[in-house]
Amino acid sequence: MSRVLAIDIGGTKLAAALVGEDGSVAASAIRPTPRTDVMATLAGLIDEVKDGGPAPRAVGIGCAGPLDLTSGTVSPVNMPSWRGFPLRDEVRELTGLPTVLAGDAQCFALGEHWLGSGRGSSALLGIVVSTGIGGGLVIDGVPLLGPTGNAGHVGHMTVDPYGERCECGGRGCAERYASGPNLARWAQDNGWKAPAGEFADARTLATDATAGEPVAVAAFERGARALAAVIASTAAATEVTRVVIGGGVSGAGPVLFEPLERALDDVAGLAFVRSVDVQPTMLGVRAGLAGAAKLAWDYSQQSR
Ligand SMILES: [Zn+2]
């Protein structure tokens, strides 16, 4: 059976898998992302996975952004040793295979569309809520990447034009309200303290919110409202009909999704915006690799 090689590159881990046309995984491996010489570790990972079967037809890579698809270069925020790094050409040279690149959150959306909560959707927005907030759009089954590959950066949609300055240089970005570190920061600024021995992070905050701690609950309500603004605005602009939310923060469950439904009911007006269906991720951490594999399959069929 013919396969493609899928690669998922993030600030904390590198993952690779051999994936069939039906999404089945023949071999996979994962390594922590090293501080320097990431390419050497990636080469070792690729070798290990490729030993698991016949030569793949193509390579699909999902990588943390920002990136530039016109040049095939990446500059991941959490990987300072890669700035303008020619990832696509390096992997193409290493493997001798047709190689295609997209953003990690775009691959998340594509993976969920192919095999997860986004299946069957004609217009899908995937949102990854984690240390930052990323996103990707899949319209009529095709990822909408944009001229340089940066479409879908919904974490930096302005949800309050008078809001706080964001690390990106913009103002009032959704990420300032709803990313994991910003949920915890706001809660701490408002008197929340993590229980003794626990990290003051979004995971602990979610546990406290689930137990009904009022500031923790309020932090998730505030974050959910920012996400609702992103979803309603994106739906108004693109008529997405389904939204899939993943990333570590989505693991908070009802303390995020229930206020999100309420907020969406409040902020959305037009019927086609109000009818957007919001779902949690089905594939979890596997969505990125699935999307990278789908990217490779589509590319190998185009270049056939
Ligand atoms: Zn921003």
Image: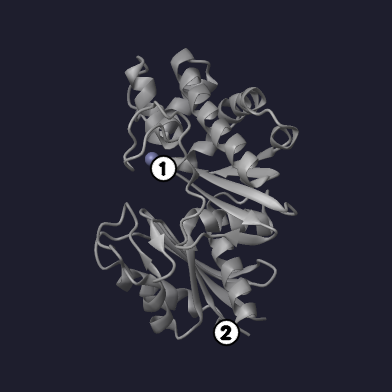
Q: Badge 1 local density, few (<14 within 10 Å), some, or many (20+)?
A: some
Among the 4 quarters of the image, the one containing residue 302: bottom right
Which x, y percent locates residue 126?
58, 48
Q: Is residue 4 left or right of residue 175?
A: right
Q: Nearer the viewer, mark 2 or mark 1?
A: 1
Q: Nearer the viewer, residue 33 or 179?
A: 179
Q: Which mark is residue 132?
A: 1
Which x, y percent locates residue 104?
48, 57
Secondary structure beneath disc 2?
loop
Which x, y percent locates residue 187?
39, 21
Among the 4 quarters of the image, the one containing residue 262: top right
- Measured in 3D between alpha carbons, the distance from the residue under mark 2 to the one under mark 1, in whole angstroms, is 37 Å
Instruction: State whether residue 194 appears in this view.
Output: no
**What is the three-letter code of the residue carrying label 1?**
Gly
Q: Which residue is mark 2?
A: 54
Residue at coordinates 73% horizontally, 37% vertically from top-left? 272
Q: Nearer the viewer, residue 206 or 161?
A: 161
**What is the three-letter code of the residue carrying label 2?**
Pro
Q: Which mark is residue 73?
A: none
Which quadrant of the render holds ligand 1?
Answer: top left
- Please say if 205 is above or below 168: above
Mark 2 within 8 Å of ligand 1, using the beta carbon? no
